[in-house]
Amino acid sequence: MNFRLKWVIYILGIFIFSQLSYAQEEESAEVFLEDYTDEFQEAFFEALKQKGIENYDKAVNLFLKCKKLDSTNNVVDFELAKSYLANKQYILAEQSGIDALKSEPENFWYLNTVVDIMQKQGRPIAMIEEQISFDNNKLKENLALIYYQKKNYQESSNILKELKDSSFKEALALKIKDSLDRPQNVDEIKPVPPVQNTNLNPLLKYKEEIGELILNKNYSSLIIKADEALEEFPSQPYFYFAKGMGLNRSGKQKEATEVLETALDFLIDDIELGNNIYRELANVYTFLGNSSKANMYLSKIKSGS
């Protein structure tokens, strides 16, 4: 598969249903390519490249070119929001993030970016409620989960109170209570999670099963189980980490790099998990002979873990 098609498949992950198989994603990517002109494609791929090397001004200009070519493309809005955010242009980031979220209010990634943008400005999400379909139940579930992941337990609880009773509400309320009861120096997520309330919380059940596979070094089954978990929970960095580890230990280093780097996209305030991901990426790039990237990830490992 060429470089360009890989980038498209990555972007399609934003809006292709998570249950699609890899083959279906590739087929959808080809359809995606057919829908856009060569000019759009060249600008979009180059923008992604520039964003990847932290050349945000060039990335923004290229994404704006894409926007002129297709003013309704919410993926372009999303990428603009992230580029503006990285470049500390918060007002522009906010508008692009809102535009993306308005087009797809149930998209977790879009909402997570909007929350980051608002927090950087010290502004509550309530200030833009009227612009983002705030009455959407799935959006509120995503928001409660985002606040929980950011350890803003009070805000997460406040959002939960607005939701109807459901297994999601029950499970997240329990996790908030457990987090508040837990000593502050204990990390939120362990690589091998403790067994607790798995009958009520499928998320914890997956983590328990994956932890056992890691302990037993059953890497082929680990990949399968992690894929299964990601179908249900596509925003959980631990599951990307587990799949990346399985791929690496199964001799599929190039695939492992993409999955592990995706884990970093979702990582929020979890030092131990972050260190594990960095170590795994360092191992992968060492095997691939890329010492500069290996050293880069090793340098990101924080002490005390």
Image (spheres, helix red, strand yellow):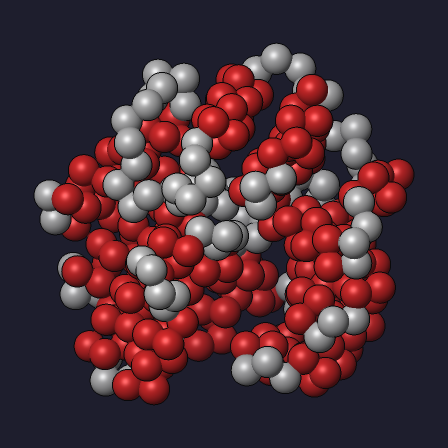
Image side of residue 86 versus residue 230, left or right: right
Q: Quadrant of the C terminus?
A: bottom left
Q: Position of residue 194 (x, y in %)?
A: 28, 31
In front of the other: 40 or 296: 296
Q: Position of residue 28 (x, y in %)?
A: 51, 55
In front of the other: 192 or 187: 187
Q: Quadrant of the N terminus?
A: bottom left
Residue 77: quarter of image: bottom right
In front of the other: 268 or 136: 268
Q: Position of residue 91 (x, y in %)?
A: 84, 64
Determine whether 87 is above or below 205 in the image.
below
Q: Let me know if residue 173 appears in the view.
A: yes
Q: Position of residue 18 (x, y in %)?
A: 47, 43
Image side of residue 219 versus residue 23, left or right: left
Q: Let me know if residue 175 appears in the view.
A: no
What's the residue at 67%, 15% (across, down)?
A: 164
Image side of residue 16 versus residue 285, left or right: right
Determine whether 264 is above or below 224 in the image.
below
What's the residue at 83%, 39% (across, down)?
A: 126
What's the residue at 46%, 40% (across, down)?
A: 184
Image side of residue 41 versus residue 224, left or right: right
